[in-house]
Amino acid sequence: MHWFKRFFSRRRYYEELSESIREHLEERVEDLMEGGMSRENAQRAARLEFGNVALIEERSREVWHWPRVESLWSDVHFAARQLVKNPGFATTCITSLALGIGAATAIFSVIYCVILRPLPYQGADRMVHINMFDHSGDRGYAMLSGAQFIRLKEVSALDGAIAEDNWAMTTTNEGLPQSVQVDQLSANGLTFLGVPPVLGRIFTDSDAPLDQEPNHVAVLGYKFWKSRFGGKAGVLGKILQLDHKDYTIIGVMPNRFSWGIVNGYAASDVYLPLKLSNDQSLMYPITARLKIGKEPAAADSELEAVYKQFARETPERFSPNFAIHVLSLKSSLDSIQGILFVLFGAVATLLAIGSINVGILFLARGVSRQSEFAVRSALGAQRTRLIRQLITESLVVASAGSLLAIPIAFAGTNLLMRWLPKGMLPGDLRVTLNIPALGFSIVIALIVGVCCGLMPAIKFSRPVASQMVADSTRTASGNVGSKRAHMLLLISQVAFAVLLLAAALAAMRTLMDLHRAKLGYNPGHILVCGLNLMEGSYPSWAERINYYEQIRRNFADLPDVDSVSISIQPLPPVSRYLSDFTIFGRSNQSEQMTSVHQVSQQYFQTLQIPVLQGRVWTEAETLHASHVAMINQSMAHRFWPNGDAIGRTVRIPNLTANNVWVFNAPGDDGSVQIIGIVGDVPNNGLNKEALPALYAPYSLVGVDWLQFVVKTKVEPMTLVHTIREKLHAVNSSQALTPVETAGERLESEGWAQERFVASLFSVLASLALLLSGIGLYSVISYTVSQNSREFGIRMALGATRTHIVQGVALSVGIPVALGLLAGTLSSILLNRIILQWTQASISSPTVLVAVAVILVAVSISAALLPSLRAASIDPMQVLRAE
């Protein structure tokens, strides 16, 4: 311990002595020069007075037994002391880097958790959904019966497959019934996925023999286990009653297991074994795993041949001229993946702006330290030693910025998760700041640190006597290279700022356009309540229709309800449910498609959709399932341009029952007569024109799932409990699926994604403007300080203060103009790439003009204070200094 203290005390003594001598040396050189001595003679005289500083520095290094470690520590220590002496410089640099690194780390955390992090399922990279595409290009699940599924598993291209059926069931053993999302998997389902449970066991083939009733066992999802059973290990063996059937809980899946509705990303609450049978009327979607090395295209060919054979056996279950394609498990993330990559490009741009800011400041500071570097070089310091010192200083700044970036990244990640639209990410996925994200932050800090310090290090590590003379006379002639470097950095910074600002303004403009889009209906005070029937309940068409109508009338009797209607398809703005159709008496009808909506007659009143021509069917026609329909304006104009649509008869194949769980109305053959025309409402998104649409009575098919659309007089969500009680009065075992308002649906399907993009781009653009303003201010301040002698002489010779201000403004106006030009050209070139994932056009003339105005305003603001300082220079003081 004594040696340790003595060692550090000696090292500190030599370091302080060396630094003290250097400081006094510089002061003595300045004093001798003021007395009329040339700089070279002043330096020689000062060195004779103070001795050889290089020997002192060498003695200091000899104290350490490992010179490289000692030297590195000395560099870090010296860099830290320099930052403490220059708090403004240090704060600006560290903050600039922290904002960029923090934002990049936050976005990377989301990208890693959503895209880069492998899914927890066995062979997830080879897992695919088998999809069927019809002649119009629409995709649907390639569903098979139990017997066909068994045969499919033997296909040589596959390394296993599972069938499943997802449905909402109801808890029926306590209090008000609650809806539970249940995924029924083939007996090999959980084994196929390869994720072990955290408690108990999973079901296997013995729990669900083919064509037999499966054992009543249940495996819980992690979230449901926590919320319903408090996360207690004693849940195993307990009974969970669903739809009046008892299921014994045998296991609990882990937290990250989020399998659900076929696509694997909507986490289910409970997993049950699926009953597979030879009944050709029971069809299930299929998920498979390709064999190692099997290409998707080759699998498509092999699977299509098998499905063609199935189609010959059951032609009524397959579309004509269909094609089979497999889509990877992550294919449903394509939309969010593109948005995340665009956002990562945006934060990378912000990081580049912050790094350029630091580069500008290091260059400016390097100019002010040229005398120091020259003296150190003259006293024996090698060029590599100076380069290492400068890079060390930049690395210290970058490291400090990276440390400050961690809380910024943590806050940014939480903010991102709050802003992300509902349903945009996998169901149970939680994005957190993790080890890979922190590693990413460290790597970025190292790269940025080296890049920021390299240019000043190379430039200022070779000082010469002429630079010392130039510094002493305070001319700008020796800093031409620095000016050029500053200009290049400033042009790059402005160009990057143009990109970010254009993206933000374009995204906000797109969002405003969506808000101004003509809806054609009123989403205000609309509550949407889904309802799933229990398996086997109301086993006839008449019973179901009467049951639905009884519930509708009960809801309508509430004093705070204006009207109640029924709809089978989702509400606008996305309610696309396409079907081909034929017009009676017309030939040449290839590829005619319409969006089909099965609703009650109150639907148009509830959503305030205008009836333009004809009439709406009556309640009596609903109860008798009359073959009538209404069409929207787009369908009338497209297929009956002469205005003779009313009275025509069309046939819709999808208006008939397509599985054993739904029932046709008496005499239903899918044909309906058009009796009215209504206004267009969005059915394919807010940014696209409405598709041709046909509205028919929901009673034509007795479905086992639908939704009640309730127009309220008060805030819709305040009536949820009352509506549940009304439903309980009709059927004490019936539950509502999760409810939402029409505004929430409009938000999630129309506005939310664009609002998310616009909000994030706005934050990044604001930071970019702030950092660009700091960079402009730094360059102008540097220009003023380096040219103060020139300004003083010009004013002494008659130049006005206005001329001086104009000159300063011109010095920054050229790089700003070039940066605007470069950024504009970049926006035009990148616009097509960005439009692939967002609706924002960053090359719009309106957007680019607005960007130019904003950046010019920021530039003027940044130039104002340094320009006034330049104009306030006293020419007499400058002449006396000469």
Image (spheres, rainbow, N blue to C red):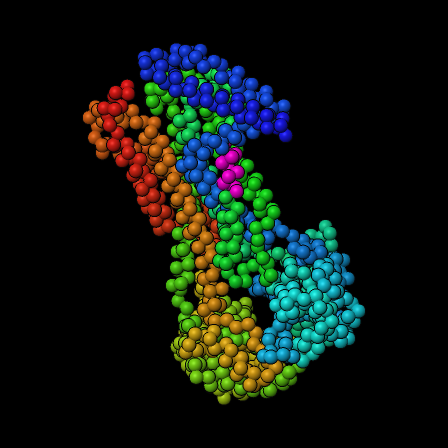
Q: Residue at x 63, y 70 (%)?
A: 228
Outermost left residue? 798
Instruction: Tell me the quarter of the image containing the C terminus.
Output: top left
Residue closer to the observer: 236 or 1: 1
Q: Is residue 398 magenta?
A: yes
Magenta residues?
A: 391-403
Q: Is residue 497 magenta?
A: no
Q: Is residue 284 above or below residue 772?
A: below
* Image location (x, y in percent) of residue 592: 53, 69
In the rendered structure, the answer to whether residue 850 lies left or right of residue 165 reads left
* Image location (x, y in percent) of residue 19: 47, 23
| Overall secondary structure of the magenta section | helix
Q: Residue at x 39, y 59 (%)?
A: 512
Q: Residue at x 50, y 60 (%)?
A: 421
Label count reads: 0
| Residue 34: quarter of image | top left
Outermost front residue? 2
**Residue 542 in sight in this render:** yes
Q: Is residue 624 above or below residue 70?
A: below
Instruction: Tell me the quarter of the image containing the N terminus.
Output: top right
Residue closer to the observer: 67 or 499: 67
Q: Residue at x 55, y 48 (%)?
A: 108
Q: Is residue 819 above or below residue 230?
A: above
| Residue 690: quarter of image | bottom left
* Image location (x, y in percent) of residue 234: 71, 68
**Residue 310 in sight in this render:** no
Residue closer to the observer: 664 or 230: 230
In the rendered structure, the answer to whether residue 165 lies left or right of residue 600 reads right
* Image location (x, y in percent) of residue 123: 71, 54
